[in-house]
Amino acid sequence: MAKKLIPITLDRIADPDNLQLALIRIYSSKPNKRIRNDRSGINLIRENIDTNLDKLSKEIINGYKPSRSLKVYMPKSFIHTRVMSILSAKDEIVYQAIINLLAQNAYHNLEILQKHNSYGHKIHPHVCYGTEVLHNADHTTNFFDFNETSFENWEEFTETTNQEILREGNNFKFETDITSFYDSIPLDQLLHAVSKYGLNKDSSNLLFHCLKQWTGNKKTLTCSVGIPTGPNASAFIANLYLMPVDLHMIRQPIKKYLRYVDDFRLFTNDRKELERVAPMLGILLRGLGLSLKSSKTNVEEIDKKLTLAQYFGADEYSEDATSVYYDKNGKAYFIDYNPNYFLNNQEYQEKNLRNLIHDLKEFFSEESGIIKFKDKELLLKKKNDGVISQILTAYKVNIIQCMDNFGFEPDESIIEIIFFLINNKQLLHRSHVYIPFLGIYSNNIEIRNRIFELLEKRMSENMEWIRYLIYETLMYFKLDQSQSERLIEIFPNEELWASEKLHFLLTRNCFKDEENKILAIQDIWDEKCHSSPINFYTGKELDEIEVDDAVFQKPQKIDEKKSLTYEDDFKPICVRLDSINPDGLNEEERELFYNVKWAHHQSKYFSGNYRDQVLPPLIEYLRADNHICIHVDEVQEITELNLSPFWRAVSIRSLPVFIKRDYPQIVSKDLKVVIEDHKGNKNPKKDVLNIAIKKIPI
């Protein structure tokens, strides 16, 4: 029986609970730190949330007028450019508020497709409860169904793709994607497609008016074509638009149909069958005003050794694993470390850093002082540029903490490799890894000068994103007078988004002690910000603004203690588990053991007592090609540490995240690590102690 649709009216869009849920979903999402949303505007709304949302509600009812979005140009190559959109805080809340209601009505139609065929930006099952999630402690307010980032959905898509590649009888693969997907969606057809999910005329007009205002590039609108690339709401509505294509394709006589956003994979055992069905995909997309990208459309016989899809590592345009912030004196420093993921063991880190450098160099050769890829075609085919990004990220986050903890110095033998990667025209989308990596050499004047030379070569309009990264990286260096003066010359004509980072560089580095220069720079910046659709901070940094998070707190379960502490409640149980198994805990202890807060406190105890001693030898053991498994009973022999069965199991469960961080090159060997119990069940519950970690083919 079909689920009855709830009409989507302006009153429901403007409902304070729906606007608050939209705000929560925007605020609690993991923003891309390279193309962040209007975070400052969101925080300003949160400072007086009731008044601001009430005002926004009235605007929606009385005729909401969206503003133009801020466009940011990001090069995909020296020729092709991706146009990203940053919406004002109010606009993004309105957009998400509409999408909340569409997702609530459409979830049951998407549910089966999300499980088996469509993997991009899966929505969380609790979206079907609408605003009820605000008042129920058992429900989550999450919009998407992943723990950290949408990269988890990509990993699932990649793993499913590889299963199909290896599946007996799948002999041919068709893969393609859509040309400029988001930018090509006709708004009238989009509105017609989504109106079946409850949008009434007024709500449909509001959505159309907003999307129309957000189309185009920096200079022009695009006549009612395209949705903004960047907001989470666009990812959902794009998926919904392609659902009729999914439903048609899964009924075709092929082995498997898969889609991740605009990437398609079809599998058959017969080439003729694939050549008959594949054109149908293009015809269906034409009916939606879309077209396939001929350069990425390919039918090939499956080579089960060479066509395994890889996890990309740091995804296109995603945030680097470490991001730069500035203290009140303008000194750059890295954030986004989680000390729980750094093994404070000097001997281990010395070996780990050497291994990372060795494995990075394995992808390159040098002839007469010129760096080259050993096998560029194979590297790009297997997407090992993603593995290189993972290795560099792992090295960077570890060397910075090792510099602080042990006085290590970064390895300078890889500098030419980094500049080779930066200047590779096919890898511009990885610049967010390569350019900030150079910040670890902050005392090297030659590198500073080479970064500045790179800036001069990237002054074209479509290189705005690259310049943003350069300005950020230069914050680690002390610039000379001529460089500082050159930056002042650039500042008035710099694109707005990149100007924010250049403003910080000028006022907190170049001229931080020259009050008159700072005032002149500030005048230019204020003028730039005056016409901006989004808010830029001119003084405080993002997270220095104090906002009461109580407005986002959900009701607690009635039986949940509100005063639980590590020392009084959780640590004593951790100590007990040094000598007993979970089934030996009493009823009150077991209640805490299964409390949602247990994982955090277990990690704290494990980190303080065992982690830095037990994990390094286990990781070193798994690095060996001939070691494919560690059973919980082998932990004591490998580590020479006497741990209880429970903490041995915790050690095993902790390994995947550290291996992914410190040993990312494992995926270049077409392997991944999984936790299994003795029956082969993956990711067993925490009270199951008979477990093992295994390296298995991707």
Image (cartoon, grey):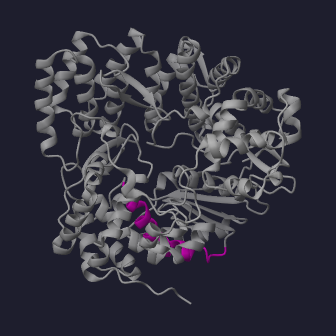
For this view, does 131 lie left or right of residue 490?
A: right
Residue 404 seen in this snapshot: yes
Q: Is residue 211 above or below residue 510?
A: below
* Residue lying at 45% horizontally and 73% vertically, measured from the top left: 132
For this view, does 258 lie left or right of residue 348?
A: left
Question: Dividing the picture into quarters, in which one does residue 450 lie?
Answer: top left
Identify the magenta region.
231-253
Magenta span: predominant SS is helix
* Residue lying at 58% horizontally and 25% vertically, measured from the top left: 398
**Residue 620 placed where, x, y %?**
76, 27
For this view, does 484 lie left or right of residue 430?
A: left
Residue 283 seen in this snapshot: no
Q: Is residue 656 above or below residue 641?
A: below
**Residue 118 placed where, x, y %?**
56, 65
Question: Dividing the picture into quarters, in which one does residue 156 lie?
Answer: bottom right
Which corner quadrant holds the N terminus?
bottom right
**Residue 184 placed where, x, y %?**
35, 62
